[in-house]
Amino acid sequence: MAPIKTLREIPTLTSLYKLKHLTPAASTVSGASSAYNDRICVIRTDITKLEVDAIVNAANESLLGGGGVDGAIHRAAGSGLLRECEELDGCDTGDAKITDGYELPCKKVIHTVGPIYWRTKKQGKHTSLLQSCYRRSLDLAAENDCKSIAFSALSTGVYGYPSNEAAATAIGEVKKWLDTNDKADKLDRIIFCNFMEKDEHAYYEWLPKYFPPAEDGKDQNKSIESNGDGQKGHDASEEKMVDQIKSELEVEAEDQNKDENKREAVDASKSEESGQVADLPDVPKTEPGEHGLPEAKKLKTDHDQRL
């Protein structure tokens, strides 16, 4: 089980560049800036273990829980989260709603409904809907006095959004919000929290394109070396912290892969014995209403009847 991680244990882009864990991009997008590198973080871990002000759940329109990150957050938060979600009357795709964190180490959970890629792409809405998820989540965090927010990789699971495209959209919208929103100063940390390796790779590719290292980085490093043992000690401590996090994440990722392979093997074995096709892993039990399935209100009613 992954340990709880505090905000100070989550490395910023500034730290990752300094320690060469993040590589500058060969080219950057128009308007790229290093101004936010002390406020943007990226980490691969279980989002339910982050001790931050708010985490963002990749929910479905019912808000009553499902598979993947959604199910993990509901399980870790306990029954109180479900009870509060039952009062929210669902959530539209591209929108977001906020609840307490209950048994999670975070204070708040922001539930946002990402687009289903293949369906919304046909309508030409996939990009704008995903952008809206990030924008609305940031707005809610700022409006509710949250100083730190951690995003899961929205829509990149069973909703099928390609990780590379999703990362570019997410990072671009976060930068736009920081550049233009009058509430941007209220957030001290914005964290991209990845669980899957494919998502981590995508963020490591796109973050340097939008948030490159500071141009005077070499001069800063020289200054650090000449500032005395106190500053050297601080830098060495920071390097040790990030290396420890990286080592922990590698162990977690290995354990996660082993667990996933084990579950797949067990499911396949059961399927062979029963002659049935195994269920896909982490498929939400309740899909959004736009799939032609019951709307959130109906899902809530059915849930109440079962109780």
Image (tube, rainbow, N blue to C red):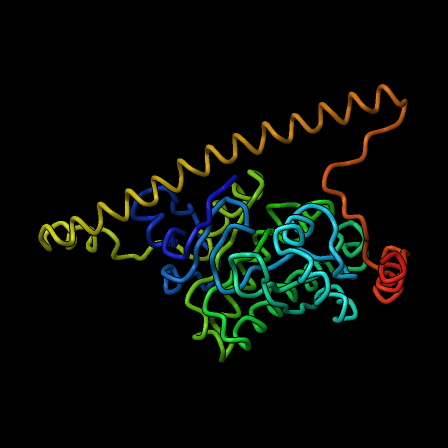
The quarter of the displayed image where residue 170 is located: bottom right
Split into 4 quadrants, where in the image is the C terminus? Answer: bottom right
**Front in this rendered view, residue 130 or 257:** 257
**Front in this rendered view, residue 278 or 300:** 300
**Front in this rendered view, residue 201 or 279:** 279
**Which residue occupies 81% across, 57% down?**
288
130 relative to 245, above or below: below
* Residue 247: % across, % down: 40, 35
In this rendering, position of residue 291 left or right of residue 267? right
* Residue 189: % across, % down: 43, 63
* Residue 30: % across, % down: 48, 61
In this rendering, position of residue 204 left or right of residue 78? left
**Image label count:** 0
| Residue at the far bottom in the pictured view | 182
In this rendering, position of residue 260 left or right of residue 305? left
223 relative to 183, above or below: above
* Residue 266: % across, % down: 73, 24
The quarter of the displayed image where residue 281 is located: top right
In this rendering, position of residue 137 left or right of residue 30? right
